Image: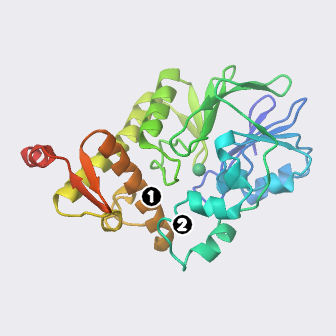
Amino acid sequence: MERLFPRISLLSNGKFTLPYCNCLWIEDDINCLVDSSPPEEDWQWISDHRIDLIVNSHGHSDHCSRNFACPEAQVLMHPAEHERVVNGEIYLRDYGFDLFPDDSVRPHYLAAVKYAPRQANGEIQDGQTISTGRVSFKVLGLPGHSAGHCGFLFPEQGFVFTADINPDAKPFFAMLDSDVDDFINSIERLRNLNPEFLITGHGPALVKGNISKRLAAYRDILFEQEEKILALLNTGKRTIRDLAKEAVCYDGRLPQPQAVYYIHECMMDWKHLQRLERLGKVIQEGEHYYLAPGQRSVLQTLG
Ligand SMILES: [Zn+2]
């Protein structure tokens, strides 16, 4: 626990350890937890306090796993996230387990990510201001990672809690309702806000200095991945599964456990292909994807 401002503390171990995330603890007239999957030692500390309100950035387990342990708290999150936090089968469906089934992974996944169903009590929407008494913050709809993914702008303190928009990591958009164009627009929205610093959901929480440049580099990862996918299509890769073996979204090597990350990679390649289709660069026939007419010669010119 680290006090950042009067009444606002950061719960973080500074590491990329799933299924945990960096959370904020606001001790005010209304005691509020922003995201609820803090590292174990922080949870031990915070669970001795009265928690009135939990505001979740989105419905992934590594951001809301302790909601179930706070029956007295009001839980708020964007309505696009509500279904998957109450039904494990929907959670698995949303992560692509029905589209890319793997019986070696599915039975273990929910326990591994500490999935614990807990219904939300209410909704948050873009532009809404939440006040806990003396602290207030504004909801920023930042979709792309998932449809209901939100950040939180603390205007008096000059920072945005960005959850899973994290320039120190790679973009993750492996849900049925993820969208690469939305992700790009959300990054641009953050750049235009020009905050003094960010608090991200994983790893070292505070991102200070060169924020616009770092967010641009983070956005550019998406464009670079799409160039790689176009190049792979040009070499004759045709299906999502063929493309996924190349692990474009994981720098060519799937992390462990590979069976899980293979499903994430399939979903993200599919999301890239959907955008490339919208841009007219790729065409789909059944399960096969092809470069659109004209794209092959563009790639050859580029060498
Ligand atoms: Zn997430």
Task: Determine whether 29 is above or below 254 in the image.
Answer: above
Q: Is residue 230 left or right of residue 247?
A: left
Q: Residue at x 70, y 25 (%)?
A: 128
Which numbered marker is on residue 202?
none
Q: Is residue 56 visible?
A: yes
Q: Is residue 57 visible?
A: no
Q: Where's residue 93, x and y in %?
A: 58, 61
Q: Nearer the viewer, residue 18 or 197?
A: 18
Earlier along the polypeptide chain: callout 1 or callout 2?
A: 2
Disc 1 vs disc 2: Cβ atoms closer than 8 Å? no
Spatial distance from mark 1 to mark 2, Cα to Cα? 10 Å
Q: Where's residue 36, x and y in %?
A: 75, 49
Q: Residue at x 63, y 76 (%)?
A: 107
Task: Determine whether 288 is above or below 186 in the image.
Answer: below
Task: Determine whether 97 is above or below 39 in the image.
Answer: below
**Residue denoted by label 2:** 97
Neighbor class of circle 2 (other Cα within 10 Å; few <14, some 14-19, many 20+) is many
**Quadrant position of residue 10:** top right
Amino acid type assigned to the residue bearing label 2 in the image: Phe
